[in-house]
Amino acid sequence: MTCRRPRPDPPGTPREDRLTVTPPDRLTLTHVRKTYGRSPVLADATLTVPAGALVGVTGENGAGKSTLLRIAVGQLAADHGQVTRTGKLGYCPQQIHLDDALTVEQHLRLFRAAYRLPDLTRAEELLDVLGYADSRHRRPGRLSGGTRQKLNLTLALMHSPDLLILDEPHQGFDHTTYERFWTLTEQLRSDGCAIVVVSHLLHDRARFDTVHHLRHGRLHVLSAEVRA
Ligand SMILES: Nc1ncnc2c1ncn2[C@@H]1O[C@H](COP(=O)(O)OP(=O)(O)OP(=O)(O)O)[C@@H](O)[C@H]1O
């Protein structure tokens, strides 16, 4: 794992020698606006995600969550505002883009080359953790929706990103896989990865450090009472 949470001062460090460790921001969106044709979607969206933070984004269907994430990863240009990212990016889009000419293993090899990884050690671990190693020689068209989503997630995680952007990443997961997904996410967060997850699930809300509700093109932080 390459991303590490900045280390706090060791116990006993004299006050005058202490360093104040503030995690670096991995993602900032500032006053972002986006309109499709004449339909405004994002009016003034601002979000900061530091290293080691797990941030949730909610909102009704069509509120603009995927648009926000696509702008965050650089897939779509904002009409106005600023986006900054630091570190290696992992992105799991809502729409799964897989090539049916390739098997699961061939997808991993292709992404290994794209990410310039020395080997597939991490990808193999993810295959095991997500419980689909027996599908490695199958093509996406022959996989269940949940297993396709496991591959989608593996491709976003296999290079140990510093910033992870996940658009409804647990769609179609059975309960065991859903719990494994959250264990994996917790491990990544404790290693200092900054993570943004779009989720509609009310029971996910307690898992996040902060939850931002996208409404009328703006992000509103949900209070602890609303999240409980
Ligand atoms: N490429 C596009 N061209 C025109 N309109 C678009 C485009 N992409 C999205 N929209 C519209 O922008 C609005 C926001 O879409 P978006 O997919 O960002 O919402 P969402 O919050 O992710 O929705 P959902 O919860 O259903 O996934 C919707 O009204 C959608 O129809």
Image: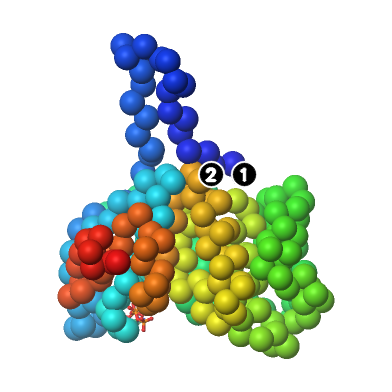
Q: In this rendering, which labeled residue sits more in front, label 1 or label 2?
A: 2
Residue 97: % across, % down: 58, 77
> Mark 1 belongs to which amino acid?
Met
Q: Residues within 10 Å of mark 1 (few under 14, many from 20)?
A: few
What's the residue at 60%, 51% (across, down)? Answer: 160
Q: Assign a secondary structure to mark 1.
A: loop
Q: In the rendered structure, are the residues bearing label 1 and label 2 in contact, judged by CB atoms less than 8 Å apart?
A: yes
Tell me the quarter of the image containing the N terminus.
Answer: top right
Is residue 128 visible in this depiction of the protein?
yes
x 63%, y 65%: residue? 154
According to the picture, the residue beneath numbered tag 2 turns out to be 191
- Mark 1 vs mark 2, CA separation in Å: 7 Å
Q: Secondary structure at mark 2?
A: loop
Q: How many marks?
A: 2
Q: Looking at the image, in which quadrant does ligand 1 appear?
A: bottom left
Q: Does 174 appear above or below 212?
A: below
Q: Which comes before the other along the chain, label 1 or label 2? A: 1
Where residue 159 sits in the image (x, y, percent)?
A: 62, 53
**Picture colour scheme:** rainbow
For label 1, the residue is 1
Please name whichever residue, 103 or 157, is drawn nearer the observer in this view of the structure.
Answer: 157
